[in-house]
Amino acid sequence: MSRVLNKSYIIGVGSTKFEKPRGERDYDELGLEAAVKALLDAGITYDDVEYAACGYVFGDSTCGQRVLYHLGLTGIPIVNLNNACSAGSAAFVNAVNTVRGGQAECAIAVGFEKMAPGSLSTPWTDRIFPMAGTLAQLWEIEEQNGYAEPENGPYAAQIFGAAGREYCERYGARPEHLAAIAAKNHSHSARNPYAQFRVPLSTAEVLGSRRVARDVTLPMCSPTSDGGAAAVVASEAFVRKHCLQDRAVEIAAVAVASDSSLLYNARSRIELAGADMTRRAARAAFAAAGLTPADIQVMELHDCFAANELISYDALGLCPPGNAHKIVEAGDNTYGGKWVINPSGGLESKGHPLGATGLGMIFSAVLQVRGEAGRLQAPGVRNALTHNVGLRGACVVSILQRPSFWKPGSTAATRFGYNVADEVRQISASDLAKVRSQQHYSDFISPPLGGAGWTGTGLGTDVPSPRARL
């Protein structure tokens, strides 16, 4: 049965800086900052929002409400989603589908995460780990390949490191290719004020760094991070009614895939890392958008490890099977090549606050399509792709493009009063006042300036801390 869906557009985006977990800011401060910035970018208030979807991994059951109640208690539907590292993209897809299905004219997706320092691990010790089957088969395959003992490194480093090792064994790629990907991403992030790591590294420095797993050095890994990101999604009618043609970016396609039977039946370390999810989500997204990889100029890929960026080139259809390392050799993954891949620095150096990661990709891609990415801007961008993976398992591929009705007008710099691509500022009290609900706001959760519990920290120099009363 054919279905006619409404077109949907991103009219506002916002992001915090992604930072090393220190416990200085709670999740609701991070989520609120991102949401306020997205609403400021859109030029609307929370009263215009009819639906909200929130993505996070480590948190209690209604963290999204906690974040958004700081903007007002308007009674709109608020849903919370956890889909591992693709939780933010799951929230984005949920908001997009709500607008496309005609259930709302305007929706907001917010992703946020407050993480524990150190390697990613599960907090649960009294229930089955969703990755248990993956690790069991990985260790079987590794033993068959001559590794008698399981690795002692973090489980994610084991999985993606083994996938990269299989790609090298099959197709002739080398550790130098993985190191070159990591070096490229760290070079890109040096110009990104939102990035956790901003020190460029050479391929030799990446190879010579401390090993985390057999073939994985520290700069090849994404860090744990705290952060938030958000996007406001609207219908074409909403865009035109509010005269937002100067900032609207069309969502040409969103596609979601979970694991197929190849996951275990292929007995492949590459498939254990989710390659088939990427393959199927990418095919669906390109078909829905009526585009091919050659039509894309910039991409934000899920480089949780350098190995995953390498195998994703193949799975996304950027090259014939087995030729991903040739993209690296040709420089076709950076400025001056076929595609600019991870201009933000990617997860490896921008950071990886799980619930915020996918929407952080959307933030970067929207600025690229608008031509507002500052020092990170790729030339001639009309179409951008984001790719977000959560193991066991979900993959989201989104394609964004400049709409046919696009017209020049205000920019993010004029809307914010500073260049958001090249500078990160925390929100102020006046920012919050501009976008919060004018009809259904309570200062009990976010008290007025100088109110009980005022700390003046966390959200900027003049915003009361949400810790103040509740």
Image (cartoon, helix red, strand yellow):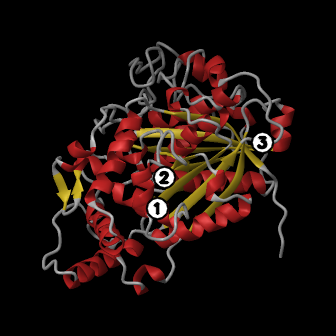
| Residue 208: % across, % down | 17, 47
Dot 1 or dot 3: first in sequence order is 1
| Residue 389: % across, % down | 47, 60
Task: Tell me if residue 469 comes above or below residue 152 in the rendering.
Answer: above
Would residue 225 be visible to someone looking at this image?
A: no
Mark 1 highlights which residue?
A: 312
Q: Residue at x 82, y 30 (%)?
A: 242
Which corner quadrant holds the N terminus?
A: bottom right
Taking 31 as reference, is 189 left or right? left
Q: Amino acid at mark 2?
A: Leu
Q: Amino acid at mark 1?
A: Ser
Return the residue nearer the eye: 379 or 277. Answer: 379
> CB atoms at circles 2 and 1 under 8 Å apart?
yes
| Residue 417: % across, % down | 60, 15
Residue 44 falls in which quadrant of the image?
A: top right
Task: Tell me if residue 442 comes above or below residue 228 in the rendering.
Answer: above
Mark 2 highlights which residue?
A: 301
Question: How many angstroms separate mark 1 from mark 3 (CA)?
Answer: 27 Å
Describe the element under mark 3 as helix, strand or loop: loop
Q: Amino acid at mark 3?
A: Pro
Disc 2 crowd, CA 10 A, few/some/many (<14, 14-19, 20+)? many
Q: Which label sits on residue 403?
A: 3
Return the residue nearer the eye: 292 or 147. Answer: 292
